[in-house]
Amino acid sequence: MVKDKQTVIDEFNELVNMTADELEEWLKKESSTDSGWSKDDGSGETVGHESGRKIIEILRKNPDRDPTLYEDEDIAHMRKVVSYQKRHLAQEADQAKENPDSKAARSLKNWGYDAQKE
């Protein structure tokens, strides 16, 4: 069953624990580029790295996280972020917390979750 819009917004705001500035700084680091699947467009960028850029846009255009200001495109990406984070946290949360340099931790950071903040 598809989650309703408000549930997606609530879960996104709970799971994305990095600010736009923190995520932007992370994405500038070389270590952010070598975890995850490469996009099919030949750019060499990973899907997660692209996702991080989209998360930054969402956070910056709605800093107060007002549910009425999210557009359908935002909600669609937020839904992907929630799905990715929940799936990977269920599988890799311990590894990400124990080793911030692990592929799991780096990948989750690309999606807006810093396991070291817990």
Image (cartoon, rainbow, N blue to C red):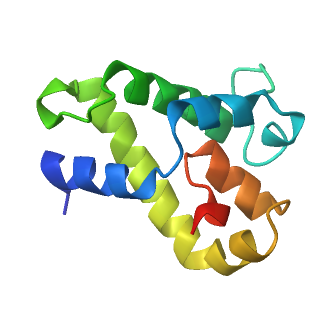
- Residue 4 in sight in this render: no
In the rendered image, which quarter contains the C terminus?
Answer: bottom right
Q: Residue at left 36%, top 57%? A: 14
Question: Residue 36, position in %: x, y?
Answer: 73, 48
Q: Residue at left 88%, top 34%? A: 30
Question: Residue 52, position in %: x, y?
Answer: 58, 35
- Given residues 42 and 81, the one toward you in this image is 81
Question: Residue 21, position in %: x, y?
Answer: 58, 29
How many numbered circles are shown?
0
Answer with left or right where residue 86 lies relative to residue 118.
left
Q: Is residue 7 above or below residue 18?
A: below
Q: Is residue 37 above or below residue 113?
A: above
- Residue 87 in sight in this render: yes
Of all residues shown, which one is farthest toward the bottom?
A: 94
- Given residues 109 and 49, the one toward you in this image is 109
Q: Is residue 26 above or below residue 15?
A: above
Question: Residue 38, position in %: x, y?
Answer: 75, 36
Q: Residue at left 26%, top 32%? A: 64
In the rendered image, which quarter contains the N terminus?
Answer: bottom left
- Given residues 114 and 108, the one toward you in this image is 114
Q: Residue at left 79%, top 63%? A: 100
Answer with left or right where residue 88 lies relative to residue 69.
right
- Given residues 40 and 5, the one toward you in this image is 5
